[in-house]
Amino acid sequence: MFKNIVSLIFGSSTTLLISSSTFLALTFSFPSAAHAWFTVCNKSTQKVSVAFAYLDINARKPDIFGNAPPQRSRGWTSEGWWSLSSGECAQVYPHELRVRNSVYYVYAKGEDGGLWGGDHNFCTIREAFTIGLADQRCGGRGEFKGFVEVNTGNARNFTYNLTE
C-alpha cells in the first residue's frame, strides 16, 4: 500500500528510499483530530431524561424565547433532553472542556421518580430545547430546575455517571 501511495505522489517510475524511523516520524508528526467531550452515563436502573448547562463562549443567536445575547456574551446555555435507558450514555457537549470552562451542570429525572439535581437553577421546558442566558430568564413556558454542579478540573473529557 505504501508503494502505491508513493507511486501516486511521485510517479510510477520513482523509487523512494525511506527509513523506518523517518516513516514513523512522518506518521506521528501530523496532529490527529482531538476528541473531547462531556458524557452523561445512566448507571441507574430506570430510564432518565437529562439536561445539561454550559458557559456559552459564543452565545450569538437568539434562543427559543427570542433572547439575543451580545456578540461576546459568556452566558449560560441549557440544553435537553437526552433520553437514556439504563446502561446508556450520551455525549451532551462535543467540545474540549479545559479550553472552555471547568464547571458544567447536569439535571436528570427518572421515570420511576429518581432525581439528580442541585442548587444551581437553569431554565428548561418540556420538549427538546436550547436556551441562552438560561440562568437569568425563563419566559412564560419555561421552568427553572436545580442542576448539580460538576467540576471537571483540567480534563479534556469527562463522564458523569447517574447512580442510585
Image (cartoon, rainbow, N blue to C red):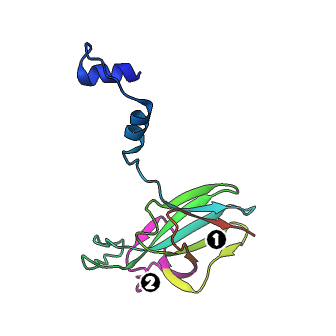
Where residue 135 is drawn, which disc sits there?
Answer: 2
Q: Amino acid at mark 1?
A: Lys
Q: Quadrant of residue 101?
A: bottom left
Magenta stretch, residue numbers = 123-149
Residue 128, percent from left and from top: 47, 64
How many marks the image carries: the answer is: 2
Do the numbered discs 1 and 2 sit on residues whose CB atoms are within 8 Å? no
| Residue in the foreground of this view, choosing between 42 and 151 | 151
Q: Nearer the viewer, mark 1 or mark 2?
A: 2
The reply to whether the magenta stretch includes residue 41 is: no
Residue 14, percent from left and from top: 26, 17
Quarter holding the N terminus is top left
* Residue plotted at (37% across, 38% down): 26
Where residue 155 is drawn, which disc sits there?
Answer: none
**What's the distance in space between the residues labelled 1 and 2, CA to CA?**
19 Å
| Residue in the foreground of this view, choosing between 58 and 6 | 6
Quarter holding the C terminus is bottom right
Q: Is residue 8 left or right of residue 19?
A: left
Query: Secondary structure beneath disc 1?
Result: strand
* Residue plotted at (45% across, 78% down): 141
* Residue plotted at (54% across, 72% down): 152
| Residue in the foreground of this view, choosing between 75 and 159 | 159
Figure check: 55 above or below 17 = below
Instruction: Identify the residue under disc 1.
Output: 109
